[in-house]
Amino acid sequence: MSERSELVRSRASFDRLRFVPTFMLALAAVIGVALAGCATRPGDVEPLPRHPFPRWVGELEVGKHDAAAVRERFGEPDAVEQSVRGGLVYRYRFAETHWPDDDPDRPVVGADGKLWRRPNTQAEDVGAEISAFGDWLDWLMFYPPKQPRPATRRSLPATIHELELGFDLEGKLARYRYTPQEGRAPIRPRG
């Protein structure tokens, strides 16, 4: 009888030993699949659409467009001057930023075509909560409390679109000069 019970006990311990690696292998597979599903691949980020500024400039026609139509299309000008001949000169300067795919400040294009900022990750939300608690603790313990610092600025490569429009006395487009050039554009970080 003792030989049989010994055989049963060794068989049970063998089954337990076989169960542990199988369980660990299955657990590792589930974790691996979950992590692979959450991982981002470099091709997941869609490129931002090009700004239509150059196309809009190409649609301008001398003698046809007036100042109101130009303001409707391009918005309010950055500078307005009186020309020597009595007309107006509008100047526009627009920086089209070239964002790296992995930049946290990179805007996201919504389904309606509008740009919006990427929402915070859970880690960023937790970090913000910890920072807010630290700021409160700092306010509680020290006087005067730490003063907020302005957000640091940085610049990224950009195409700078410069447009100068000359209007005659009647308000019709008399001439325009468009010069795109490579440069850098300042951006404001999130936060």
Image (tube, grey):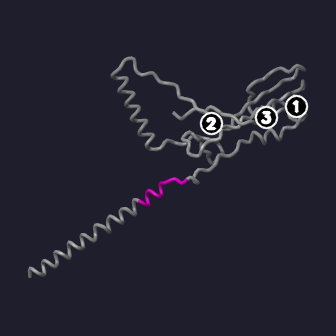
Q: Position of residue 46 (x, y in %)?
A: 62, 50
Q: Is residue 37 magenta?
A: yes
Q: Which residue is mark 1?
A: 175
- Whether residue 31 sits left or right of residue 73 in the image: it is left
Residue range highlighted in magenta: 32-41
* Nearer the camera: disc 1 or disc 3: 3
Q: Earlier in the sequence, mark 2 or mark 1?
A: 2
> In the rendered image of this protein, does residue 42 appear above or below residue 7?
above
Q: Is 118 on the left or on the right of 65, as rendered?
A: left
Amino acid type assigned to the residue bearing label 3 in the image: Thr
Residue 175 screen position, x and y as percent? 87, 31
Per the model, the C-alpha gap separating discs 1 and 3 is 14 Å
Q: Are marks 3 and 2 in contact (CB under 8 Å)?
A: no
Q: Is residue 135 above or below residue 21?
A: above
Q: Which mark is residue 156?
A: 2
Q: Residue at x 58, y 41 (%)?
A: 106
Pointer 3: what residue?
A: 179
How crowded pointer 2 is (Cα within 10 Å; few <14, some 14-19, many 20+) is rated as some
Q: Is residue 128 magenta?
A: no
Q: Callout 1: 10 Å neighbours few (<14), some, many (20+)?
A: some
Q: Disc 3 on helix, strand or loop?
A: strand
Residue at 56% in and 45% down = 102
Quarter assignment of residue 61: top right
Which mark is in front, 2 or 1?
A: 2
Which sits earlier in the primary sequence, circle 3 or circle 2?
A: 2
- The residue type indicated by label 2 comes to Leu
